[in-house]
Image (spheres, rainbow, N blue to C red):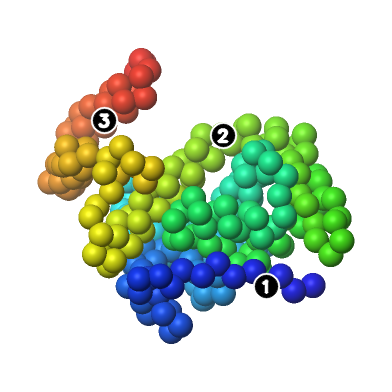
Amino acid sequence: MRHAHRFSRRECGMHDSSGHGPLDMFRQMFGGHRRGGGRHGFGPFGGFGGGPGGFGGFGGDDAMPRGRQFSANDLQLLLLALLAEQPSHGYELIKALDTRSSGFYTPSPGMVYPALTYLEELGYVTVQVEGNRKRYALADAGRAHLDAQRERVEMLFAKLAHLGRKMEFMRRAFAGEAPAAPDDDTRGWLPEFVEARMALKQALLRKSSAGADEQRRIAAILRRAVADIEGRTED
């Protein structure tokens, strides 16, 4: 059965038919994926990635494995998490990932449908046939698996949102529009937030050759900072 569902993003020169528009180049730089595109990591049904460092080339501090940054297991978790929200057809899941990443990640049917079949074989999803389409729903076993991986799922969606904001920034820039206001629905970043984030990265870069004792001192500082940001007590 063929699953031909298109999600066009040609507005304001975002990409052209050759795949070399401005935002296509952004995807290539940072590991994004257009449906029908080329580079995948292949487990049972592939992944996406590319670029140096952590997730999609954003450096090794992004809590993502190097190499194939969006693994087959990650795709499974994303699909299960979306099905936890509501039963869906395969193309609806593709569109949901496209929307949440502002077009940065739009997996092909050739990635998603085999993944769903695999999840069905594991007993993590159930399938209801509706004419020539299938509606997938989360099974109890899938919910249990998802709950056990909740922290990973939150990280994956946070990273998709992060890259989606960058895509939106690029779209606005190429369209000649003003940057998003911090309180609008694109959740733009305040200048002081960006400056603090950059200052931290620069400080860590300057300490990249630090000795073992200094690394331990910095690690302790960072653990306390993370605990403070998340509103918890560092043991």
Q: Amino acid at mark 1?
A: Ala
* Mark sitting earlier along the chain (3/1): 1
* Mark sitting earlier along the chain (2/1): 1
The residue at 22%/39% (across/down) is: 190
| 43 versus 154 height, above or below | below
Q: Residues within 10 Å of mark 1 (few under 14, many from 20)?
A: few
- Residue 167 is left or right of residue 194, and the answer is right
Pick the residue in front: 230 or 89: 89
Q: Residues within 10 Å of mark 2 (few under 14, many from 20)?
A: some
Residue matched to label 2: 150
| 18 versus 105 height, above or below | below
Residue matched to label 1: 4
* Mark sitting earlier along the chain (3/2): 2
Q: Amino acid at mark 2?
A: Arg
Q: Residues within 10 Å of mark 3 (few under 14, many from 20)?
A: few
Circles 3 and 2: CB atoms closer than 8 Å:
no
Give the foreground label among 2 and 1. Answer: 1
Give the foreground label among 3 and 2. Answer: 2
Q: Is residue 225 visible?
A: yes
- Which labelled disc corresponds to residue 222? 3
- Residue 231 is left or right of residue 34, and the answer is left
The residue at 48%/66% (across/down) is: 33
Give the foreground label among 3 and 1. Answer: 1
| 9 versus 96 height, above or below | below
> How far across and how far down the image is residue 94, in percent?
60, 58
> How far across and how far down the image is residue 193, in percent?
21, 38
SS of the residue at dot 2? helix
Pick the residue in front: 80 or 170: 170
